[in-house]
């Protein structure tokens, strides 16, 4: 038996095995990243849905929330506290969302709708007043400013403010 041929075949088999392993690992890393990204988006969406549930399931709070967005002077101290804490909850959740974006787990296209919604809340009359009371990381404050003009996409928010003011 020619040991040089056997050695060459073994060497080629080793190279093929290494290449196959690298390809397999690359595919697995990509699949894991995609799964992590999907799980992050699901978790973040669930968090916003939980925040929205407070408004959806409690008509009195929904009215307080809408009135508070239109202007905090129209609600009592308890209402201001509720609106402030709800807004802080939205901010906390948005900050977590922004961290996912900064770490590369959330693409910009998935961040933008949330940025527009946050800008709508924070640029409402009540939101602007609360904004001055909150500490906002610079990136969050920049997002609120950057998407300010696009927040008109939230027609329901604008119409709610107009209904309350009239």
Image (cartoon, rainbow, N blue to C red):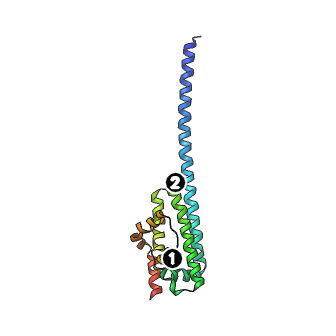
In the rendered view, tell whether residue 29 sits above or below residue 120: above
Q: Nearer the viewer, residue 57 or 85?
A: 85
Residue drawn where x is 57% and y is 86% of the image: 76
Q: In terms of sequence position, does the residue under pointer 1 or pointer 2 come before the other? A: 2
Query: Which residue sits at x=44%, y=84%?
Result: 162
- How many numbered marks appear? 2
- Alpha-carbon neighbours of circle 1 within 10 Å: few (<14), some, or many (≥20)? many
Circle 1 sits in a helix, a strand or a loop, which is it? helix
Q: Position of residue 22 (x, y in %)?
A: 54, 35
Please tell me whether mark 1 or mark 2 is closer to you in this view.
Answer: 1
Q: Which residue is mark 1?
A: 130
The answer to whether residue 120 is above or below residue 12 is: below
Gap between marks 1 and 2 measured at Cα: 28 Å
Location of the C terminus by quadrant is: bottom left
Depth check, front residue: 111 or 11: 111
Query: In the rendered image of this protein, does residue 90 appear above or below residue 30?
Result: below
Q: Label 2 belongs to which residue?
A: 103
- In terms of image quadrants, where is residue 86? bottom right
Residue located farthest toward the bottom when viewing the structure as drawn: 166
Q: Quadrant for the N terminus, please.
A: top right
Spot occupied by residue 109 in the image (x, y as percentages of width and height): 45, 59
């Amino acid at each position: 038996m020619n040991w040089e041929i056997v050695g060459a075949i073994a060497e080629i088999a080793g190279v093929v095995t290494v290449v196959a392993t690298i390809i397999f690992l690359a595919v697995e890393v990509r699949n894991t990243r995609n799964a992590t990204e999907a799980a992050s988006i699901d978790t973040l969406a669930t968090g916003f849905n939980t925040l929205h549930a407070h408004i959806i399931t409690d008509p009195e709070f929904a009215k307080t929330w809408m009135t508070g967005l239109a202007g905090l002077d129209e609600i009592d101290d308890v209402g201001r506290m509720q609106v402030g804490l709800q807004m802080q909850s939205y901010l906390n959740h948005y900050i977590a969302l922004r961290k996912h974006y900064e770490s590369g787990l959330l693409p910009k296209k998935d961040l933008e709708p949330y940025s527009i919604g946050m800008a709508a809340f924070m640029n409402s009359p009540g939101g602007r007043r609360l904004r001055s009371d909150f500490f906002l990381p610079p990136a969050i404050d920049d997002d609120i400013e950057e998407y300010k003009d696009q927040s008109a996409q939230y027609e329901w928010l604008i119409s709610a403010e107009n209904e309350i003011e009239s």
